[in-house]
Amino acid sequence: MSKYSVIGKRVRRVDGPEKVTGNAKYTFDMVLPNMLYGKILRSPYPHAKILNIDTSQAEKLIGVKAVVTGKDTIGRKQGIWRRFPELCDEEILCRTKVRYIGDPVAAVAAIDEDIAEEALDLIEVEYEPLPAVFDPLEAIKEDALQIHDGVELNINVTRHIEWGDVDDAFRHCDYIREDQFKCSSQAHVCMETHDAVASFSYDGNLTVWTSTQSSYYIQALLAGMLDLRESDVRVIKPHTGGGFGSKFELDSAQFCASLLSMKLCRPVKIVLTREEEFTATKRRTPMYYYVKLGAKKDGTLLAKEVKAITEGGAYTAMGATALYLTGFFSSLPYKYPNYRFDGYRVYTNTAPTSAMRGFGGPQATFVGESQLDMLAEALGIDPIEIRRKNGMTPNYEVPGQAYIQSCGLQQCLEKIEAHIKERGKLPPNRGIGISAYGFMSGGIFNWFDTSYAFSAAIVRISIDGKVDLFTGACDIGQGSDTTLSMICAEELGVHLEDIRIHAADTGICPADLGAWGSRETLMNGNAVKMAAADAKRQILEFAAAKLGANIVYDLDIKDRWVHLADRPERGLSYFDIVKEVIRGKDGEVIIGRGHYTPHRKGMISPAYSFGVQAAEVEVDPDTGKYKLINVATAHESGTVINPLGIEGQLEGAIMMAAGYGFCEDQPMDAGKILNPSIADYKLIRSLDMPETKILEVDTYEPEGPFGAKEAGEGLTCPTAGAIGNAIYRAVGVRINELPITPEKVFKALREKGKQGK
Amino acid sequence: MIRDFKYFAPKTLREALALLDKYKENCKLIAGGQSLLILMRQGLVTPEYLIDIKGISELNYIKSDAKGGLRIGALTTHRTIEKSPVIQGSFDILAKMEKRLASIQTRSWGTIGGNLCHGDPAGDPAPVLIALNATLTAVSLKGKRNMAIEDFTVDYFETALKPDEILTEIQIPVIPSHIGTAYTKFNIIESDLAMVGAAVSITLASGDGICQDVRIALGAVASTPMRAKEAEAVLRGKKVTDNLLKKAGQVASTEAKPISDIQASEEYRRELVKILVYRAGKEALAKAKQT
Amino acid sequence: MKEELRLTVNGQAYELYIKPKTLLVEVLRDHLGLTGTKRGCNCGSCGACTVVLNDMAVKSCSVLALQANGGEVITIEGLANGAQLHPLQKAFLDYGAFQCGFCTSGMLMSVKALLDENPKPTTEQIKEGIDGNMCRCTGYNSIIRALTAVVKGEYKEEK
């Protein structure tokens, strides 16, 4: 029997009824009185000076109420790495220069979308095209043009991570291999595109409803860019149709809608088209990887040296984080005594690259797991064995970087080993490949330079016992509303339906850094638990007095019953005691407060989750086409708060991660994305989705609320590597460049045939 | 953004033809609109007059003709074809092809005629109909004319229909015994358009396994769906062996005129032609031997 | 020049005057305020706009409203019976067959049309039935489990 009353149960999502009835309102659905519709004009050039913008004809069009350009801004540059001004390099509405195809130059507000679109055609922009560079390997050359003034070799960010003595260690290796990999970009393809309704009122306050992963970041960045007091900006997150990393930075819809609204004192709505979504929002960071791995002949890994050159695109965005994290994730999930990473993020004249679910992890894991399999084969060691030998274990310290408390990697390996045995002997051209990963539960870094706690929560209990939970956490589909409500209910000892969550409205909820880096469950969960515990303590104070309990007894609340922990039959109804508590407090509602900011938790994260995935593919050796038959994942995320939620996150992650390995790509020609539509950008659909098997491993993470840690983002790390390894086992060819398309497999097979291997 | 247009919804073929005749190049016909509306929303097609023929029920039918062949009204939806017991019975290859065409939603509203008139060389129906030796009828106020399906598409998204004509019917001759037809398409995502498509129909002379006739139709490897006539010549009049089928595939791959695009290189497409023609040929041969 | 459109939506008859270029999805969302039906692309690919028109699942962004003249439309708002959720909605809730929810309205209409036409689809038929609906969150398998439960009779309506 579970020791928990609420968490760990398969519950219906708290936002479920709204969503399955079509009642859930998204920013996409919002209509306000007196509202105008906005559209954005974007650069057709990858790199150009803006000589002049003539908006006069557009302004004359009947129905157009305002046109804004960079001249209407305060001329600031912004970026999410606020602590480093040199990384705040994006104006959004460009004043003098455009740096990628899609860079905004003007915006229009009109009485309907059609007129706004027509008006865009009437804006005349005089550009002076400049030479452009698209590949980071070209952009980093001595003679390459400079995309941002003063940034030499276009090197935007560098990152160095090191421990041990890699050079010495290589001298002691029995086997060393060096490999190169190329990891592709990927588009988030949220079902709801970026959108915002901005309303500036005559009292000087700006309210913005937007599809976002962090209403706080948007609030702060907007305030900075509009010269408003931060708290005069209120950002409200309605139901949000997906984020996956694309929606926690200030985007063109939010900024232009706000600018236009400020000019007119009327609400302005901007919804990006799907094409804008593909071309002019941020995307996964493509990376060139150069990796050297050394081991003893018994398979003990001694040293790993990694160099990564990433395609930054036109602006820094969150790309600096992707660079850093890929450097750290390249060391997961193994115990490397010696490790060195040097990463370079290089500006290019392409759409900026930033955060996408996995955040450098899918790239690092594809590279690491492919190379490890190659090394294992060369040494004649079983792939599970080599991972078992070197895999992280609980209470392991990564020198100078991280302290890993809970870690169920070994158990995950066991489960996958059993699964593979169960699959038995495979028919020809079929193979199972495995891939192991580790991932963070939110980051410890404060490059946003916030003075707020990273997460905070307020619990308010009314006279009838109803609990209002206020949190800045953003539910973008991953289920944080439900998970946090469950944590609150569990801690407070009430039922899930006693909790009503208010989330992500900066006007009434505490600040939260947002839904990224898989931080909500651990960080917000801790804040919520603390707030609920605070409220509970106030109730128990009164209950102790009421019950006249002996001092040796503890009190607790479970299932709406306030009682002596050791004598549960002695107690009273939660509803009754709440009334007395409020009376005792001069009629004030009960307020509990909580917060969480990681302190002294290493360089990356307070906690890490681990897993191992096995992908089974069947290859058609004549065409190179392969089918994903089955993906089994053994993973551990500490205590499972919301099992239905985690399963959903796992299967959804497979779809996205398999897509990264198999079919999703954004081919470009001179900086122009060639497939900016859902018809042309290949996405896995129901007929393409493999069977999925979930193997849970039980662990407990002391850092997390009730022992919980991340799930949902780490799971996007392993699949590309598992697919690559599976194809190798099936037909003996290895592809080091993502995505692994049938044509690449075909060419590799033909090459292999020619070489008579 | 769709530009404004004047809208007509004729209920009979006669009415529709009169409107076409009146507005000629300034108008466009819309049936299911599953392809057309995308073009109109992107501003690529901007007719002044739109003639909605979807409601012309007299063009929505599946009938057997006197000899047991098939007559399909141009406004029959893909889904109707997919689920028709008549078609599933004797023309199952058509039902199978429809099953993998786009999605159910598209198939429920889109029509076979609309698909053919869109003229996409990657479309599924055309190669299959070519392999089935189908013909079609185009009607105008001046009269009607028939032509082979393979002559219908003349270039990328361009057909042989005159501005005053409406495609009314597709005719598929009965499939006698000793004929087997197969269609296979290559794509990465199941419901995607073909990256390369091949439909093969093999007629065996009774008893001796000699190929009496053969039709090989390719999709997505030229500006129109095309017949690989040189590849056909490899098989016609010969005993069809595995090696011969491979050779036919080889010849078809040189006949094809694929391009390199973001989906695949020209070279890969040629390789796929080789393989798909061989595989479809093998399947067609097996079917021919069974009947 | 506007044309008359007569349409029954969720059992309610409407008479509207619309520009001929108006898409069915625009009539539903913008004219009738039924915002449950969403739009996710501009090329008829994502399926978020799926509604049931004359008993068929169609993409309402790819149907001119006037083509539905005289027809019967069911949108997500018409699935529940007042406060009583439809078995499909209950199954979606129990099986976690949605996350961000943006594709859910279209997904439910596709599956409604599928089950109305064939109450006992195979797993393969279920997959085909929802192949036209893009979901970026769930990986589809939970949706298939939810439908399978309905097909097996787990949600037989109380008499």
Image: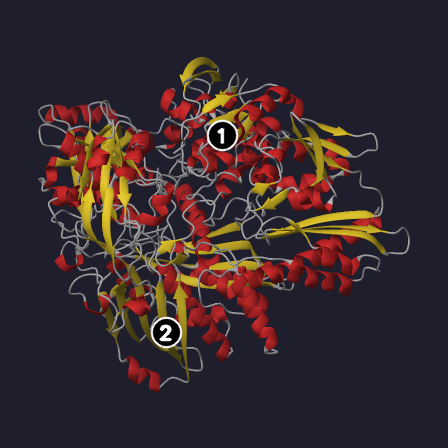
Percent of width and height locating residue A215: 22, 41
Percent of width and height locating residue A619: 59, 61
Residue B26 marker: 1
Residue A612's place in the image compared with A476, above or below, is below
Percent of width and height locating residue C111: 53, 32
Percent of width and height locating residue A312: 28, 60
**Callout 1 amino acid:** Asn
Compute the Cα span from label 2 to label 1: 62 Å
For the C terminus of chain A, the quadrant is: bottom right
Residue A291 marker: 2
> What residue is shown at x 69% (from left), y 55% (from top)?
B228
- Tags 2 and 1 touching, CB below 8 Å: no
Badge count: 2
Q: Is residue A448 left or right of residue A182?
A: left
Q: Is residue C68 visible?
A: yes
| Quadrant hosting residue B106 | top right
Residue B156's place in the image compared with B68, above or below, is below
**Callout 2 amino acid:** Val
For the N terminus of chain A, the quadrant is: top left
Q: How is the image coloured?
A: secondary structure
> What residue is shown at x 79% (from left), y 59% (from top)?
B235
